[in-house]
Amino acid sequence: MTDISSIIKLTAAEIAAKIASGELTAVQVTEAHLARIDAVDEKVHAFLHVDREGALAQARAVDAKKAAGEKLGPLAGVPLALKDIFTTKDMPTTVGSKILEGWVPPYDATLTQKLKAADVVILGKTNMDEFAMGSSTENSAYGPTGNPWDLTRIPGGSGGGSSAALASFEAPLAIGTDTGGSIRQPAAVTGTVGVKPTYGGVSRYGMVAFSSSLDQGGPCARTVLDAALLHEAIAGHDPMDSTSIDAPVPPVVEAARNGSVQGMRVGVVKQFSGEHYQAGVVQRFNESVELLKSLGATVVELDCPTFDLALSAYYLIAPSECSSNLARFDAMRYGLRVGDDGTKSAEDVTALTREAGFGDEVKRRIILGTYALSSGYYDAYYGSAQKVRTLITREFEQAFEQVDVIVSPTTPTTAFPIGERADDPMAMYLADLCTIPTNLAGNAAMSLPCGLAPEDGLPVGLQIIAPAMKDDRLYKVGAAVEAAFVEKWGHPLIEEAPSL
Ligand SMILES: NC(=O)C[C@H](N)C(=O)O
């Protein structure tokens, strides 16, 4: 099997096994994916930067290890698409923003270092909403990404480049970050798998900060097992990140290999339904709940009234933290510098640079956050939002006394057309209605495909939520659901994706 079309369809686990057995070389696998990128990425625009030479060098190193008889790791030689929010010392890191155009960081993020140590082949950096603010990837300063299922539609956001790279078979693995849903919502609308690990489970060192108490990097893949393998490779305590959890990584790979919901209590939250939900999404979700019952789970109805306030709380907390974090882009240290002609003050240069370098959504959030934190408003806005956050966390704790996991649709609708919500921030924010509560509480959550919506034939995501540091439950349930769907459909959902 050396033809491109067969190689790009392999899962990460299959690729690693074939490289380890000598059936394929890492260079063959890398070349096949680079050829696929050459063939389709002009249309998809998943990548902002492709590191052809770096990827091939890494692949050659894996092949040399194999030739020398060294033991290869579980993802050695597997190509990966890295969200352009993680620092890479040998590639630019733009975060989808003009303000960092051309910036090559002086260091690798911990996650980047871990990928390299695992001999993963980093193909390049993927497109994203500027500073991870958005749900469609339209807020990228470098133009939108298309959804491989229908290029006129959004691939989700902010990590739309990563999800599109998976769905277009440009990479079998990708990395995302999830502040309010940026891993899970793109996974849902592209028919792929995305996991937001427990907050603190994957290091944030070298991950450009948006909202530090919410941001969490995590794995994206086309199968539950592949996501678990990647999860294990990137997770773990990091002394460079003060919020990193100093505890063993939950046994995610073992769970993914032993999928089961037998005897499990699964919660369905009343608040994850209502007027904003598309009929076909609700239908596929209800079928998934029936499937869980047929596989041996008990379904428990839950009432979590403060979840209705999650979106409002998020849009105070995240912009507040963003207004503080993005203050570092002052034209003095790195990145863009506008108007420095020797006649202007440092303040003017900073103002001109931020005016030119940030897009509308980023400016909107900086203004919102600065207002919410300002004297006289702090208690009314930021303070109240933090109280709501505590209540949501408590409601989750109470819910997890009754159930092992919670399920919901990942996002209320399927992929919407590019441009449809671009001028309506509130409509855009609704895409994260079901994902945000988890970020506020710091729990772990997964999105995996549960079918196509009958009205438009586009993928629907099932969200599974587990308590903090019980990430393995996501994989146990996810693997069982995935196996049942494959049996029902006769193949993984991604095979329904129209070829580009
Ligand atoms: N960053 C995220 O998780 C995305 C979320 N839609 C936001 O715009 O904040």
Image (tube, grey):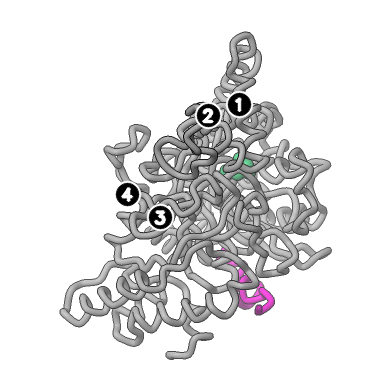
Q: In this view, does 416 lie to the left or right of 22?
A: right
Q: Is residue 244 left or right of residue 196?
A: left
Question: Separation of disc 2 and disc 3 at Cα?
Answer: 26 Å
Q: Is residue 154 left or right of residue 254?
A: right
For ligand 1, the image quadrant comes to top right
Label 3 close to label 4 by CB (< 8 Å): no
Quarter of the figure with residue 363: top right
- Going 58% across and 35% down the picture, which residue do you hit? 352
* Position of 420 relative to 370 (above/below): below
Residue 251 appearing in the image? no
Q: Which of the numbered marks, if any, corresponds to residue 321?
A: 2
Sequence order check, earlier mark of 1 and 3 = 3
Question: Separation of disc 2 and disc 1 at Cα?
Answer: 7 Å
Name the residue that disc number 3 marks: 231
Q: Which of the numbered marks, if any, corresponds to residue 106?
A: 4
Name the residue that disc number 1 marks: 369
Sequence order check, earlier mark of 2 and 1 = 2
Q: How crowded is mark 2: few (under 14 residues within 10 Å), some or many (20 or more)?
A: many
Looking at numbered disc 1 in the image, what kind of residue is underneath it?
Answer: Gly
Q: Which of the numbered marks, if any, corresponds to residue 304?
A: none
Sequence order check, earlier mark of 3 and 4 = 4
* Span highlighted in magenta in the image: 482-500
Q: Which residue lies furthest to the front in this view?
A: 343
Pinpoint residue 174: horizontal percent, then vertical percent: 48, 61
- Going 37% across and 49% down the picture, which residue do you hit? 105
Say which of 289 and 416 sits in front. 416
Sequence order check, earlier mark of 2 and 4 = 4
